[in-house]
Image: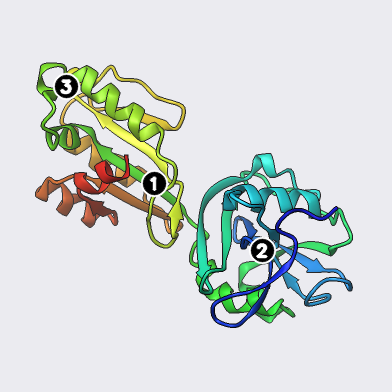
């Protein structure tokens, strides 16, 4: 059954694309392996390898499109995918979004409909040697850099201190309000993604120590010095496949976090996202 976006259009660069409102695909990875689709003989790029995906509906979010299309074309249980973000290719009025996510356990996956001939887990190092669908081949070098976790660590006291809203009269209440705002973040610009959905961590101290977790925010209680707790948190997170960002304006803390491999962002950056 055709959907509202299922037709060819021409972009501003003069290319012909499938998807009246753009398109999106899903790159799922697990321990250095990526899930690829072999396109059917009836598809564009017949029998080449690429990502599960397809045309967006009008006003449909890229993540929704990528997960829906993958579920239609394969047996992957997309509810188990932890989406990390997406990368956008802009073709002048038409765009393709590669949604990147991972699994805690690898699933056996097969084709589900006529668009897919096969599904296969492939080591990332072997992808370039396959017969790839040409648009995916062009995007793969950039997409591969996004097979990572992104974590955002918030220096709660420092961010609260950047606001002139009377936070000092009720530190616990101010920290709770900030946590609730951070919990509602719906994607932020963090490299290598155009839009990232980072793991969210807030370090709380002093009178704000009793602020607990939220749906998408994990709080870390500083029993002693808040800066020391932030640095220790960064150490625990540090790994080759993790990008850690610390939100703080404290110069010494920035230096200490950078020494542990983290990048830093100012409070204004975060407040502008809320």
For disc 1, the marked residue is: 151
Q: Residues within 10 Å of mark 2 (few under 14, many from 20)?
A: some
The local secondary structure at tag 3 comes to helix
Question: Upstream in the sequence, badge 1 or badge 3?
Answer: 1
The quarter of the picture where the C terminus appears is: top left
- Residue depicted at 24% across the width and 39% down the height: 230
263 on left or right of 51:
left
Q: Residue 90: x percent and y percent?
A: 51, 70
Question: What residue did someone put label 3 on?
Answer: 206
Quarter of the rendering containing residue 77: top right
Residue drawn at (32%, 28%) of the image: 179
Pick whichever of labels 2 and 3 is earlier in the sequence. 2
Q: Quadrant of residue 8?
A: bottom right
Label tally: 3
Q: Secondary structure at mark 2?
A: loop
Q: Nearer the viewer, residue 220 or 13?
A: 13
| Foreground label between 2 and 3 | 2
Is 184 or 108 nearer to us in this picture? 184
The residue pinned by badge 2 equals: 20
- The answer to whether 222 appears left or right of 82 in the picture is left
Is 155 placed left or right of 200 in the picture?
A: left
């Amino acid at each position: 059954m055709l959907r509202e976006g299922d037709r060819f259009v021409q972009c501003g660069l003069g290319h012909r694309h499938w998807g009246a409102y753009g398109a999106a695909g899903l790159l799922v990875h697990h321990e250095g392996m990526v899930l690829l689709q072999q396109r059917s003989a009836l598809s564009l790029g017949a029998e080449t390898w690429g990502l599960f995906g397809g045309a967006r509906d009008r006003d449909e979010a890229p993540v929704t499109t990528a997960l829906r299309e993958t579920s239609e074309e394969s047996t992957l249980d997309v509810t188990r995918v932890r989406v990390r973000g997406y990368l956008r290719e802009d073709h002048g009025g038409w765009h393709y979004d590669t949604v990147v996510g991972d699994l805690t356990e690898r699933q056996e996956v097969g084709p589900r409909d006529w668009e897919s001939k096969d599904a296969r887990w492939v080591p990332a190092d072997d992808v370039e040697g396959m017969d790839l669908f040409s648009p995916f081949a062009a995007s793969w070098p950039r997409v591969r850099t996004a097979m990572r976790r992104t974590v955002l660590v918030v220096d709660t006291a420092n961010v609260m201190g950047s606001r002139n809203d009377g936070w000092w009269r009720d530190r616990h209440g101010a920290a709770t309000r900030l946590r609730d705002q951070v919990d509602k973040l719906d994607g932020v610009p963090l490299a290598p993604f155009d839009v990232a959905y980072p793991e969210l961590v807030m370090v709380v101290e002093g009178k704000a120590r009793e602020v607990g977790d939220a749906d998408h925010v994990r709080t870390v209680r500083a029993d002693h010095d808040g800066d020391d707790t932030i640095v220790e948190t960064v150490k625990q997170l540090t790994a080759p496949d993790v990008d850690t960002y610390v939100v703080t304006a404290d110069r010494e803390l920035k230096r200490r976090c950078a020494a542990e491999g983290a990048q830093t962002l100012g409070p204004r950056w975060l407040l502008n996202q809320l």
